[in-house]
Amino acid sequence: MTLIDFYSGVEDRLAIAARLVAKAASAHGSVRVLTPDAATTDALDKLLWMVPATGFLPHCRMDSPLAGETPVWIDHRLEHTGPAAVLVNLHREAPPFFSRFERLAEIVGLDDVDAGRERYRFYRERGYELRAHDMSTGR
């Protein structure tokens, strides 16, 4: 069953996503990031060219010809057919394919609290193990 971590109180959702992607790719090999729209996909794509500062993190969109050889996929498509180690969710709703993944990181921004609570309730009602991380306190 998918292990779900909630990161709440997040001021900069993309910065936290970039940190989580780097950590997850190193530890688990493959990462999918679900974004809410094309603009967010583009913004995270640009950020991952700079983060981590000490090295490039290979990433692409799902329709890239290099997707099969790339460890990190960033896309706003509500489908997934590739590796299923870690999913990072920046979408306001629970991804329809989340249960395929070993781990799910839910990032709840300061402007996303109500939607985050709904996602938390959704997973809890289905019996998933949930862990909470309050990012507003620097932890």
Image (spheres, grey):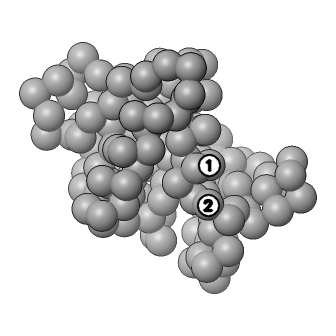
Decide if residue 119 is in sight here: yes
Residue 66 at what x, y percent from top left?
A: 17, 23
Q: Would you name the residue on which mark 2 appears?
A: 12
Left-right relation of 70 to 4? left
Q: Residues within 10 Å of mark 2 (few under 14, many from 20)?
A: few
Among all residues in the image, which is located at the extreme left? 65
Residue 86 at what x, y percent from top left?
A: 50, 35
Residue 61 at what x, y percent from top left?
A: 23, 40
Marking on residue 79: none
Give amino acid for label 1: Ile
The residue depicted at 56 percent of the width and 28 percent of the height is 53
User: SS at mark 1?
Assistant: helix
Residue sitting nearer the eye, 80 or 123: 80
Residue sitting nearer the eye, 28 or 99: 28
The residue depicted at 82 percent of the width and 62 percent of the height is 136
Left-right relation of 30 to 22? left
The residue depicted at 61 percent of the width and 60 percent of the height is 12
Decide if residue 104 is in sight here: no
The residue depicted at 21 percent of the width and 40 percent of the height is 62
* Rendered view: 13 above or below 122: above
Give amino acid for label 2: Asp
Residue 82 at what x, y percent from top left?
A: 28, 31
Q: Check whether the beta carbons of the residues at disc 1 and disc 2 lie within 8 A of each other.
A: yes
Q: Would you name the residue on which mark 1 appears?
A: 16
